[in-house]
Image (tube, helix red, strand yellow):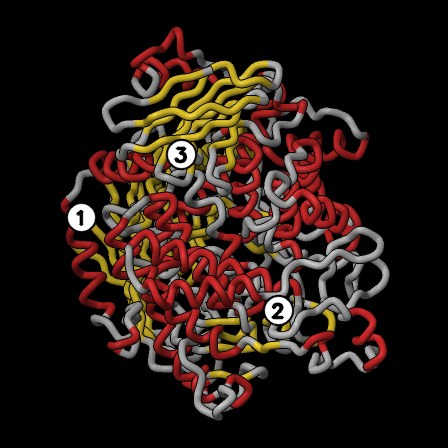
Amino acid sequence: MRPFFFLLLGVLFHGNVLRAAEESTAWKSSLIRFSRPAEWKETRPQKGTGDNSWAKDATPIGNGRIGALIYGGVEKDRLELTEISMWSGGFCSAEVKDKGPDSVKFGSYQPFGTLEITYPAAENVQDYKRTLDVAEALASVSYNSGGVRYRREYFASVPHQVVSMTVQGDRPRSVEASFRLATLHPQDRITATAGGGRGMILMQGSLKNGLTYEARIAVLPRGGSVTADGGSITVRQADSCRVLVSLATDYVLDASRNWKGEPPRKRNEAVLARALKAAPEQLKAAHRGAYGKLYHRVSLDLGETEDATAELPVNERLKRYRQAVDAGRDARDPDLEELVFNFGRYVILSSSQPGNLPANLQGLWNYSLIPPWDSDYHNNINIQMCYWGVLPSNLAECYDPLVDYIREMAPAARKITREEKEFRTAGGKPAPGWTSRTAQNIYGGQGFKWNKPASAWYALHLWERYLFTMDREYLKTTAYPMMKEICRFWESQLKPLHAGGSNFRTEDRKVTPEIISRELKDVKEGTLVAPMGWSPEHGPREDGCAHDQQIVWELFNDTVQAAETLGVDAAWRKELTAKRDLLAGPRVGEDGLLLEWMIARKPGGSWDPRHRHTSHLFAVYPGSRINPEKTPEWAEAARKSLLARGTTGDSRRSWTWAWRASLWARFLDGEKAYEMIRGMMRHSMMDSLFTTHPPMQVDGTMGIVAGFAEMLLQSRTGRLHLLPALPEAWKNGSVRGLKARGNITVDMDWKDGRVTQFRLSSPMAQSVRVAANGTEKTYELTPETPVRGS
């Protein structure tokens, strides 16, 4: 992609001239190409197998509620259909998640069904292409067969809430196909009808937990004939055929209604009636307009890939990139790296839209009745990571499903927390506020081990939503009340240590009283610790784990700032500040590494120094207490700890690369951060560009967006730092539309690693401290006058 320069563009920076200049090469970083159909197996992957075959190279589309994976076969195509609320299980709280009847089991995310499409036998298939344009959210399949050029186009519309598919040939009456909806749920009832030149497939069913659901698939040929036979619709000798898919359940994200909404039939009827009124070109235009309004807020240019490389199918392009990483050389494909960033934003837009549940472990897509980890909401890193890149990549609307989920899960979490004996206060009363076990479903149910700081980590996300949007009404009515309640929980839980830690507790039998006395001799009377925490996902339970301490400090600190912003709770704010300052802080071991537990473990102060989690570095990222500018000694100890973690074995996980990219960016080390991106692309990325743990999970796919953003722009410490962690490979480039805290939109160009031009804009007046090219300067920003600098 070509650089753009402010002096040339002036006020046209965001206009059509820029867009036209970019379009000639934008496909290199937005088009995912294949020269063959996706692979698929009839056998569904089993729980815990790590089978990635279903997502290895399929094409995903989604509108935040309905998703489809497209395989693109010539004679047999299939769309794996999902709906974000299609869940078994119910309300529960247990370490073993699946005891008892289905309504009180934890359950799992369920596939909705498979739209199977059969075409006539192919003749001499040539020039096969399967594409996904992430800039338009349009997927396609095209090929020549029997002298006809066939083309299929697919998209998932937010405005019309349907999946649309169009099949056409370049010769009249050349389209023939049979459509059948298959299900993994034997209780489903499937019928097909035809009349008036169109066909309809109807599927109705209910799960054992009482969730009811329905699918309606309209088959709309232009010309030719349409007939129904059993559960199938067949189209013959049509010029083209359009298919509209509407899926619905009776679930609603509303705890006060016990999760029950309107009947799925009612929703499907309304959705299809509206979609059928729209002409095909209107439906597509509405989809492109709604999607593009959000996607095109950000444009990234890291250099230009040669045409010959960019035109390769993505599997070959990735193979070439991996070989370059193995050889330790530049892959010379910056547009592929941009595509990873753009695909991450595409997945955010496809699996997280306002009014819906948030993205789960697999985003929106699923192929199994028993997906790994139930495709649930894991709150010890995974769901949070899915949303790290949303705000800085200027997609605040896509953040709302997470906020809504936290709010609606809170009543059930309160009940579960009150009933947990471990959380009883010193006076034996139920704990105020709430927290959660590690895994959550959509019915308020929880499973696996307690993740005591889960709610405090959620509070950081509530606060971040305010910082990036500066929406004071949201802070007042939504974020602050929840943050305050979560603080109340932690005020009731914190444990004051005696001098020297004489009342310190651990489950590690190797830690003797003598060791405690030696290791904690510097602990002062009244130092506050989170009792009996865990450093996910390893080691013993113990007082004062770094992970818990850092998250609680962030909670108290952010809540104090929120109260100050609103001008409320002055007396309590003072008390909370005092408690924050009494929290046991980061500790550095004799080897100079940040300790993961208050009691040092060897080597490196951690139970497992090569573990995939970097839980004790929360204060670096996504927190901010530890940073090179304000806490250089802690930052250096944390940096050494991250270096000691390594990038082999257990550390080669999709989400691990993403977290460490942002960590290295916070350490201002662009080369190390870039190494994490290359590592993810080499070891943990499939040809579909989905990342794999294994198995397939979207946390790394979505989380790496934050890594890119942190390398280019940081705003957590009260200033805007431009290009804080730029690697040599990206020495020339540009970006427009990144979002900084303070609701500031940032555009900039750079050359030879130095910012040449930047532009800041905001809907509110404020003073902005900007660090760029080794200097700092304060600018006065107003809504009427964007700031330009160099």
Q: Residue at x 34, y 17 (%)?
A: 13
- Kindly state the secondary structure of the residue where label 3 is placed: strand
Question: Which mark is in front, 3 or 1?
Answer: 1
Which residue is at 44% across, 79% downward?
Answer: 89
Q: Is residue 244 above or below residue 723?
A: below
| 557 left or right of 615 in image | left
Q: Which mark is residue 276?
A: 1
Q: Earlier in the sequence, mark 2 or mark 3?
A: 2
Residue nearer the viewer, 229 or 277: 277
Q: Residue at x 33, y 49 (%)?
A: 163
Compare residues 591 and 309 and report the one nearer the observer: 591
Instruction: Give the secondary structure at mark 2.
Output: loop
Q: Residues within 10 Å of mark 3 (few under 14, many from 20)?
A: some
Image coordinates for residue 108, horizontal then vertical, percent: 48, 72
Residue 149 is left or right of residue 291, and the answer is right
How many numbered circles are shown?
3
Q: Is residue 622 left or right of residue 693?
A: left
